Amino acid sequence: QQQVKQSPQSLIVQKGGISIINCAYENTAFDYFPWYQQFPGKGPALLIAIRPDVSEKKEGRFTISFNKSAKQFSLHIMDSQPGDSATYFCAASKEYGNKLVFGAGTILRVKS
Amino acid sequence: DVKVTQSSRYLVKRTGEKVFLECVQDMDHENMFWYRQDPGLGLRLIYFSYDVKMKEKGDIPEGYSVSREKKERFSLILESASTNQTSMYLCASSFGGGNEQFFGPGTRLTVL
């Protein structure tokens, strides 16, 4: 049973375009929602995270939008660049220091 | 910078062999995790540990065991490797009260 569902599986975006990756969760006890970025040959690294007390968080070209009532959150990458080509994972956890539940991942390719 | 190192980047073993995967972190983190990463399935938690000599099962512990004798080191053991354990194995660590997990580069294990 997948607690965090991520879509799409893969995404191709033109340079300068907007990349959008979506996630939906089932457990209303989740209160921390991070996105991880993984380049080939590397482990995932935290990109940006949000808690459910805000609906949006922006860091540079990366924005998380959070919809608590719909139990959905998404990652938007503005002005996508070839260097953004990577695998992106959404995740969720219940409380501080607890284990993360990951989505299946999205392979993003930004064409130059 | 937090550093999580894994003993091997690539490993090839035969069916039935006992396999040890080692992970070391240098930031005095309380929590350590072992995941396996498979295409289309994301990261799935095998085991985690909140303290020395403590371990808890994750979502897919069957066929695996772990050992944490020192705070900085967390070992994953495949008692009798099988071909369905061919995968990328990722180790991660985090502070006891924190959510961000720091990942190692991964070990790609092939079981023939």
Image (cartoon, rainbow, N blue to C red):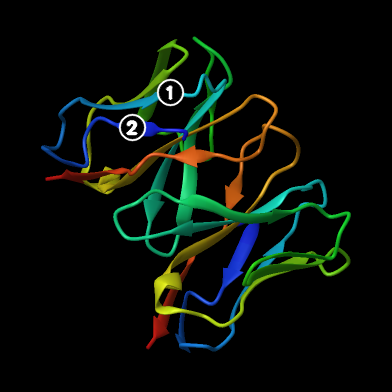
Of residues B28 and A107, which is closer to you in this image? B28
Query: Which of the numbered marks, if any, corresponds to residue B5?
Result: 2
Question: Crowdedness of circle 2 by 10 Å Cα count: few (<14), some, many (20+)?
Answer: many
The residue type indicated by label 1 comes to Asp
Of residues B7 and A72, which is closer to you in this image? B7
The C terminus of chain A - image quarter = bottom left
Residue B77 horizontal/vertical position (percent): 31, 25
| Chain containing the residue with disc 1 | B
Determine whether the residue tagged by mark 2 lies in a helix, strand or loop.
strand
Tags 2 and 1 in contact by the CB under 8 Å rule? yes
Residue B112 horizontal/vertical position (percent): 11, 45
Determine whether the residue tagged by mark 1 lies in a helix, strand or loop.
loop
| Residue beneath the point at 46% across and 88% down | A15
| Residue beneath the point at 53% across and 60% down | A89
The residue labelled by disc 1 is B26
| Chain containing the residue with disc 2 | B
